[in-house]
Image: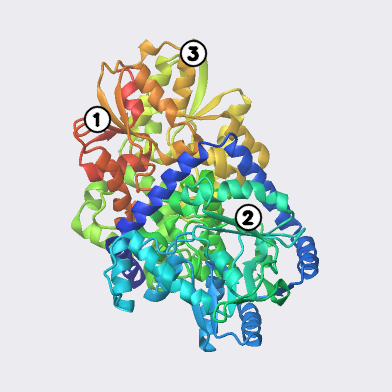
Amino acid sequence: MSDARTTKAEHIRHILETEGAAIEQNTQGFNDGRYESVADLEDYEGLKREAREIKEDAIERLPELLDDLREAVEANGGTLYLADDAADANEYVRQVVDDADGERVVKSKSMTTEELELNTVLETDGVDVVETDLGEWVLQLADEAPSHIVAPAIHKSRESIAALFEARFDPDQSLESAEELTRFARERLGEQLADADVGVTGANFVTADSGTMALVTSEGNARKTVAATDVHVAVAGVEKVVPTVEDLAPFLELIGRSGTGQDITSYVSLLTPPVGSPTLDFAADERGTPDDREFHLVLVDNGRLAMRQDDDLRETLYCIRCSACSNACANFQQVGGHVFGGETYSGGIATGWEAGVEGTDVAAEFNDLCTGCSRCVNACPVGIDIPWINTVVRDRINRGDVDADEGAVEWLVEGLTPDADPSGVDVQKRLFGNFGTVARLGSATAPLSNWVADTDVARALAERFVGIDRRRDLPQFQRETFREWVSARDGLALADAERTVVLFPDLYTNHVQVERGKAAVRTLEALGVAVQVPDVTASGRAPLSQGMIATARERAEAVAEALVPHVEAGYDIVVIEPSDHALFQREYEKLLDEPSHEALAANSYELLEYVYGLLANGADADELADGDGERVAYHSHCQQRTLGVERYTEAVLDERDFDVVTSDAECCGMAGSFGYKQEYYDVSVAVGEDLTAQFRTEETADRAVVASGTSCLDQLEDLLERPSRHPIELLAPE
């Protein structure tokens, strides 16, 4: 295994041990709060659509809006400066501070100033820079980077913050409770605010029509930063501009709910600087006039205008920095932004920001932690396709990255795994991206292939050269594939069937979990449906997960060529593997021409969704196996949840009298190849333990383990050491 993988694995283990518990508790709390808060909205999806439309319009008309904003700011008595990059922005702010004879700058929370590294620049000039956001101040004292876009110190426990304050300030009384820590911080920061010369804030939104800024905070420190200082500098990315004040409405409804589960954040400040309050001289206890105030709005490009011209990264600019994608992500919930993040930004959307602002080399450091489950898409208040952004950047990394350490075996893997991607693709990605080739070889040589793969020597070699963790059990290939079984049997004749479907034989069903394929056929036939199985098995999911877009598109086109004629003949497509069904519904929009995608999306169904539909339309449920009260512990696949089809499995099992307990864990942690990779094995297991803990309780420990997804079945069987089955195997008649 390469040194880079070893180093990354060790770093992840360290973060899991030192920060993981606090991150998991807080992010899961935020995510649970989001579910509860948005449930109170009358039209949550409508609000999201409205917010997205505003952002789409704003980014499309950005040059025009910037001109309007400049006029508004100048009419208000302020100055707008458009900075090309970080150096340009920092130099402007330095000059403002210098002109004000600024010795102390107080700041409210601003990710953009983190991006610019403004604190470091000002401190180099001898300026005392003080963060007034509690989390940011804690990290400033600890000399640590934020681990979360909204809650920067989310990885810090109350005990660690108390120890930090004790070490730095030696307070007269010990600080233990959250109230004591907060009171102490408030008093210290109040002193700093009273003696400050310049206040620096960010801006959640800036309206072009009036120059109004929206500042959304939990502590009110942004208001104090503005009011306490004569000179106010607001620093924001150009993407923060929206057309009008009225356009703020949906964002203010969504941003708190999406980020922290609050119906509205504690402080929402709409300021049209320079603000109309008098200046304050705390030392002399004197007030000045509003005319003494000075305001500078620094809007930062720093790669954003290039992102606006990039068809794949453009959506990143719709981001409102709410952190919903981080809180919803099972991997982020375990490791936070110190693993799943770059120079400034963290979580799923960070790949777009870091690639656009810093470059793909920075994004490459954490991009693989996005497994493409799409939970973040549903969580995002503006519906950004974050998995696609991650996939595109991964593809760009692949095309620009040749790992010299892997070169010795690259020729071998390339020879075994022909695809449409360049030879420089990382050998690990190359192998997983061409799982179809591996599966064909595995079945053709089974059971010998399974015996060899399970030896200590093979496990050690796989870990050394490909980065497959030796602790993970490998797939057991079946000698007789599902398609071979179908071809050798006499199925229900078309003439005797009430309808005909095409059952898509995904790679795992065809080569590994063949029994679920057989059960699917028997179930459908029992309900009067003739089954055809096409001569295509590779959906493109495997290469897409590795960022091999050219190969994924090639596979998708082959699927469309095989399946669209069946659709045109009036047949439905039934898909066993939820991740492939999601591919047909969503990602094929990016990989296929519009008519092909629409044909497959409109006419493909997840297997139990289809069985439910048959029963709802008069098929005889008694033709299926009777559960007779069998106790089942069921886990639905993450892609079923994002598409809203998991309920059909539960409904069918209930109809057939199975006693079902369903996990509320949203992810199993395996995520296809992710759980096999040595550098991510520990994250995968940590996520999986949240699920398996629910299946080890007194109520569930003796239940049959059932899951809909390939990865879920593998993870549950590995971690529980109990057999697991697909739900169709419970329902199929003998």
Q: Earlier in the sequence, mark 3 or mark 2?
A: 2
In the rendered image of this protein, does residue 35 appear above or below residue 389? Answer: above
Q: Quadrant of the C terminus?
A: top left
Residue 30 image point, x, y percent: 43, 49
User: Looking at numbered disc 2 in the image, what kind of residue is underneath it?
Assistant: Tyr
Q: Which mark is residue 704?
A: 1
* Mark 3 or 2, closer to the camera: 2
Using the numbered discs, state the Cα–Cα distance from disc 3 to disc 2 in whole angstroms: 50 Å
**Above or below: residue 586 compared with residue 280:** above
Image side of residue 84 versus residue 6, left or right: right
Going by the numbered disc 1, the residue's amino acid type is Ala
- Please report whichever mark, 2 or 1, sits nearer to the chain's N-terminal start: 2
Q: From the image, which quarter does the N terminus lie in?
A: bottom left
The answer to which of 505 and 98 lies nearer the viewer is 98
Is residue 261 toward the left or the right of residue 243 in the image?
left
> Element at badge 3?
loop
Label 2, label 1: how many angstroms apart (C-alpha)? Answer: 45 Å
**x and y percentages locating residue 581 in the rendered image:** 49, 36
